[in-house]
Image: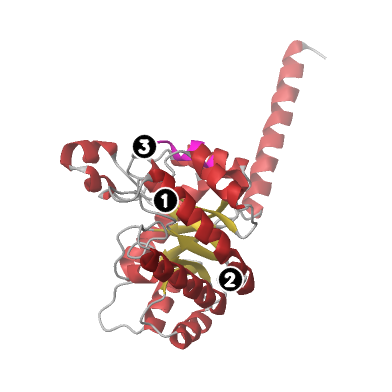
Amino acid sequence: MTRRTFLETSTAALTSSVLGSLARAGDEPAAKKRALKKAVNLGMANARGASIADRFKMIRDAGFDGIELNRPDAIPIDELLKARDAASLPVAGVIDSVHWGKPLSSPDPRVREQGFNGLKLALQEAGELGCERLLLVPAVVDKNTSYADAYTRSQELIKQAVPFAEKARCRIAIENVWNQFLLSPLEAARFVDEIGSPWVGWHFDIGNVINYGWPEQWIRTLGPRVLNLHIKEFSRKKRDEAGLWKGFDVELGEGDNDWPAVMSALDDIAYHGWGILEVRGGDATRLKFLAERTDRIFAG
């Protein structure tokens, strides 16, 4: 075989192989890269005159896989159950609606008791809704509540809530928020580990961390403790130019989140749960835009 014949034969074989691979790829649907499910809070579905059932359906039709609710709340459980079943839209997460106003860290024992009762009721209602994860802000540090007291008070009450979580079959997921508490991933992991229960883990808010850290680092440190995710953006530039809270005033996918790095970190810890959007909601068009934007982020 001459050199020219060899090159012609090799080129033909390579071309045939590549074309065959492309044909096979075209014949088969692309596999999902990640088994992540997306959800939004009920409050993000805004339609004038829409019933609860209409809003559930609006969220489903926009392309979301689940819904987040706040409990306790004025909406009756029965109404939510009917809307959930009619839309075939599972409850991805429930937020304890009492934890900010009645923090478990309060120096007033009566306030702590009210907060604990709110947590128990939220767990009970989450269980009735078939939800497996309850978001809890564990404590608030302020001028009247020291860091140390917030730590011990909240940890003690969360331990006492574990039997109620087990009964409801709903895990307590502690969220990182701007409450001047649990400000590093190492401390966050330690706080959960000291409680020592499989019924307590972490609700990781990706956008909240950017002001003082990097989400991908938190994710790898928290590892299997991550039970749920909040998805949102934050812009350090807007924060610096217009004020702290203006940092959130940026469209999903256009802030300082390094989404490929975040997704890689989630892959590393084998996270396959919910990503719940916590951004500006709106009508059906807005929700569809958010669903499509989230799909691109998850596939990145």
Residue at (30%, 60%) from the top-left corner? 280
Query: Residue 168 or 15: which is nearer the viewer?
Result: 168
Residue at (47%, 56%) from the top-left corner? 154
Please count the marks in the image: 3
Circles 1 and 3 in contact, beta carbons < 8 Å = no
- Residue 292 is inside the magenta segment: no
Quadrant of res 215: top left
Graded by Cα atoms within 10 Å as few (under 14), some (14 to 19) or many (20 or more), the crowding at tag 3 reads few
Which of the marked residues, 1 or 3, is nearer the chain's N terminus?
A: 1
Disc sitting over residue 212 in the figure: 3
In percent of width and height, residue 167 lies at 63, 73
Relative to 191, is 171 above or below?
Answer: below
What amino acid is labelled 3 in the image? Tyr
Would you name the residue on which mark 2 appears?
Answer: 164
Disc sitting over residue 150 in the figure: 1
Which of the marked residues, 2 or 3, is nearer the chain's N terminus?
A: 2
Residue at (79%, 12%) from the top-left corner? 2
Magenta extent:
213-219
**C-alpha gap between disc 1 and disc 3:** 20 Å
What amino acid is labelled 2 in the image? Phe
In percent of width and height, residue 145 lies at 34, 50
Q: Element under label 3?
A: loop
Specify whether residue 284 is in view: yes
Which of the marked residues, 1 or 2, is nearer the chain's N terminus?
A: 1
Query: Residue 127 or 59: which is nearer the viewer?
Result: 127
Quadrant of res 56: bottom left
Q: Nearer the viewer, mark 2 or mark 3?
A: 2
